[in-house]
Image (cartoon, rainbow, N blue to C red):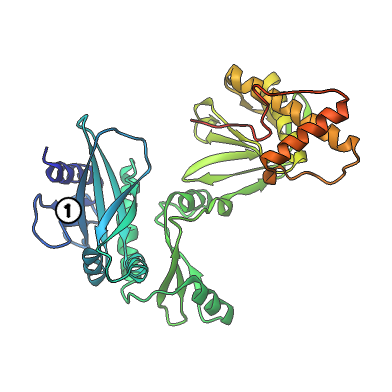
Amino acid sequence: MHIEGISVATVQKRISCCWGLKPFIKDGDKEPSWDGNIYVYNNDEGKKDGARRVPVQVKGKKRNIKQANDFLNHQVYISDIRNYLNDGGVIYFVVAVYDDQTEQIFYKSLLPYDLENILNKTDTATKTKTIKFLKLPDSAKDIRKIFLSFINDKDLQASKKIWTPEKAMEAFKKGNANEVFYLQTESMDMCSISREITKQSFYLYAKTPEGFHIPFGNTENCTVVMMTREKMELPIFIDNVKHYNCFYHGYENGKYYIYIGNALKIPFNIEKKKIENGKINFRLAGTLTQRLKDSNFMVSLLEHKEIHINNSKCFTLGEISLRDTNLLKNTNLLLNKTKYALEYFGVSVDLNLDKVTEKDCNSINALINASEGNEICFKNNQPDIFYYIQDK
């Protein structure tokens, strides 16, 4: 099996299907560190006006079993990293080639900010560096955005100067720079911007009064979900009983969600106006009071199936397995028993269940037993106060 040939052909085929992208990658190319270029055009006819060149490297890795991973680790030579830095950056592809004759493409945009950080954290004796590669998006539009972002950020990082976050914060406090970032978006409405913020990785820049951009961070390994959540002051009802005064909505990784309480996350299809695949994510978290409130809500939802926002029907719950249903009900029972036991012994402070240990759980069970005046044992199938339902 000619892994490199298959890998190059796979990348060529995928890129060729993207509007305004033209690959020129050679199989078995002997040029050090690079395998070719992908040209980015302002049109789909491949006219040279305004074309930009993006250097690329393609490597293949043989895999026995296909796994649904969103990333892949791959070792890159330090000598190649130095070459990429001298050239201003590269988009590096790794193609996983499986025994069943299928492939998966992973990529990594390596620009001066990334390359300098890698070299600064690597001693001189190290020959290779393990780098995390992300799965290439399925959407041709999203693939094009990767190249457009690379070109824009390569221009902004042409000086190859980088700052630490601490140095950038100091400059911001003194008024010597402003924090900026750039997204590739087809629309400037807030909905599109919120979606792209959670979908794209982007660099954080300190912009000086002279107009220079100095990178000091990126969002690839950061969580930016809270940046896109919006509070809605509308009550949540089940069977005419109000459970919450408000809810939140926003985007995670480009997908739209509605958040109810401290535990319920609903993937919602805005265009179809229904729950995505009829599934929900539910994970208890927080204090005893918060978990009780959320589990009471879910037990009611299991019975009545419908969620109303401001007295208008919005969601219908899909089927939940009997195992999950019984676990949730047992969990709700245990939480109520815990609340009663604490009140019985005069404990008024709310219990933070996020920090309890296994030993604490045993103590809670002892309190429950003592408060009820008899021995209750859950040695088998003991309810779990950390219960959750989540898409597999």
Q: Residue at 44% x, 49% y: name it.
A: 199
**The residue tagged with tag 1: helix, strand or loop?**
loop
Q: Residue at x 14, y 46 (%)?
A: 4
Residue 175: tell me if it is visible: yes
Residue 32 lies in what quarter of the image? bottom left
Where residue 218 appears, x then y in whole percent?
44, 62
Q: Is residue 330 above or below residue 207?
A: above
x 15%, y 41%: residue: 6
Front-lying residue, 267 or 105: 105
Closest to the observer, 78 or 57: 78
Rate crowding at label 1 as few (under 14), some (14 to 19) or many (20 or more) other CA atoms within 10 Å.
some
Task: Give x and y (percent) for residue 310.
Answer: 72, 34
Q: Position of residue 194 (x, y in %)?
A: 51, 51
Name the amino acid type tagged 1: Gly
- Disc 1 designates what residue? 46
Residue 102 spot, x, y in % from top left: 23, 33
Relative side of 380 to 149, left or right:
right
Would residue 344 be found to the left or right of residue 53 on screen? right
